Image (tube, helix red, strand yellow):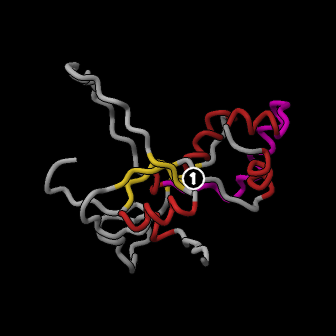
Amino acid sequence: MSRGQELYCEMCGSRIVGRPYRAVVDGVEMILCASCYLKLMRSGRAQPVRETPKRVGVEPRRARRSPRPRRVSLELYDIVEDYPERIREAREAKGWSLKTLAQKLRISEAMLRKIESGKMKPSIDLARRIEKVLKIKLLVPTELEEDYETPPPEGGLTLGDVVIVRRDED
């Protein structure tokens, strides 16, 4: 992080003044403000990120990156309406059980059951994995509405904009 770069808490979205904290919250590494870090640590929902010890006298190797084509924004795609039927039919055509497909997708069997029943819509990332494993088409380009009324928040969405944080009463 360079000097002068403003950081924002990935939990509450507030500007971080002072030291940013890195923690793993529900399996996701996040940059947090002191307030969110302390609350999550006290509740046991966060684990501090373990910094790797630096070796004295050894410069870190810099990986050479090959120029990769830019990925198309995931927001430009939507999931087809009949995704439950497409997934179930493709799974059955391969002769796989729910358990087998769930293992290949690295998700729980219960989650896959909800997706196949239409009770839960998969994320764009998960839909891409399902497409790859089952060799089916689930994503279609989104048609953007021209009369988009609310502009996205400055700096983009944060987890705090989307999630409702449950506060434990002491």
Disc 1 marks a residue whose amino acid type is: Asp
82 or 40: which is nearer to us?
40
Q: Quadrant of the C terminus?
A: bottom right
Task: Please identify the quarter of the rendering in which residue 4 is found.
Answer: bottom left
135 or 102: which is nearer to us?
102
Where's residue 157, x and y in %? 40, 65
For residue 79: magenta? yes
Q: Image height check: is 44 above or below 128?
A: below
Where's residue 117, x and y in %? 80, 56
- For the point 65% across and 40% down, which residue is it? 130
Question: Which residues lie in the magenta part?
Answer: 77-98
Residue 11 is left or right of residue 122, and the answer is: left
Which residue is disc 1 drawn over? 26
For residue 115: magenta? no
- For the point 77% across and 38% down, which residue is it? 90
- For the point 55% across and 71% down, which residue is it? 165
